[in-house]
Image (tube, rainbow, N blue to C red):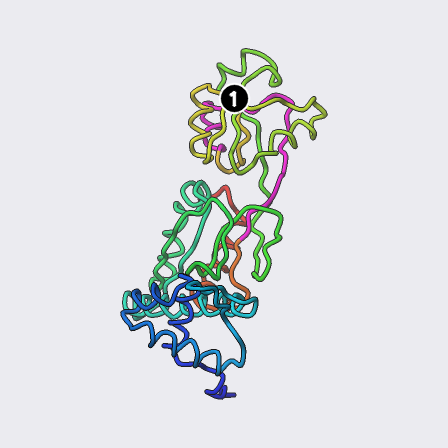
Amino acid sequence: MATSRRFTPPLAYLTAFEAVARHGSVTDAARELDLTQSAVSRQIQKLEAQVGGVLFERDRKRLHLTAQGASYARDIRAALAQIQTATIALQSNPDGGALNLASLPSFGTHWLAPRLPGFLSAHPGITLNMSTRLVAFDFADESFHAAIVHGQGNWPRTGQLKLWDEQMLAVAAPELLAQGAVTDLPRLQLETRPNAWADWFAAHNLPQPGKPAMVVDQFGTMLRAAQAGLGVALMPDYLVAQEIQAGSLIELPQARPVSIGAYFLIWPERGGDYPALVAFRDWLQTASATRFTL
């Protein structure tokens, strides 16, 4: 059923509103939009009249979003980003669709990228744009269709596909492991897994450790540091399978894997039926079922 146009403000009103909401200033928004201040002010006034509510509180020369305005700005920003993404996708790939994906750096580099040729050859009309993200973000503030993340599955306002539980292995270079017990060896820690070693020691009924010898921001860096003998590393099994097989890293004797989270594909709850995402999600579900096989 068609929606009445009285519920759809003109795009000019929404663009002006989003710019003022972002800058907190009519002057700055007008400069960005190449409009006069009075033109931007009139558009905001007309938008407030149409929605029947106050979107900004005036404080001298600054504008502050009301609670209603902040909620509306988040939704409008996401809608404008979607329009922009759709336009870029149509221009760059008129016969298919673009999929903007955020991924954890090591996951994207070491697991996903080597498998993507299979997906792209099966879906030649899809253009995949992949960026890395180490920290949480809001889909409303980004133009991503989906993201691969690590955690416990507690991301509000998203659809989710669990890929697999992360199994962490304690590994070290052979020459380092020969120097003593794990409690006496230097440890490497990932910045985004601050409690990983505490969980590992608790699971093995060992005394809680002191500070790590080195903290790094990516698994790729920690992998190379472990191979260089700089410390014992807790690494996901899929990232060190080849190194263990080659003998450059060895699992700690009598140690067992510890799970401290899982990998998920997530997407905005209103964007789950986007065709390029549906194709990628179906492929990823199959690929993750045999995650050690290329």
Residue extending farthest right: 205
State the residue position of label 1: 213
Q: On screen, 251 above or below 288?
A: above
Residue 201: % across, % down? 66, 27
Residue type pointed to by label 1: Ala
At 33% across and 70% down in the image, what residue appears?
87
Q: On screen, 254 above or below 257?
A: above
Magenta-drawn stretch contains 246: yes
The count of marks equals: 1
Q: On screen, 184 above or below 163?
A: above
Crowd tier of the residue under label 1, counting other residues whose Cα lies within 10 Å: few below 14, some 14–19, many 20 or above = few
At 41% across and 60% down in the image, what residue appears?
143
Side (left or right) of 171 relative to 145: right
In this view of the protein, which residue sits in the foreground, 141 or 91? 141
Side (left or right) of 192 relative to 79: right
Residue extending farthest front: 60
At 50% across and 57% down in the image, what residue appears?
138
Residue extending farthest top: 179
Residue 175: % across, % down? 48, 14
Q: What is the span of residues highlighted in magenta in the rendered image? A: 240-264
Q: Quadrant of residue 248?
A: top left
Q: Quadrant of residue 18?
A: bottom left
At 57% across and 31% down in the image, what residue appears?
169
SS at circle 1: loop
Magenta-drawn stretch contains 82: no
Residue 266: % across, % down? 53, 56
Q: Quadrant of the C terminus?
A: top left
Residue 109: % across, % down? 40, 42
Q: Quadrant of residue 269?
A: bottom right
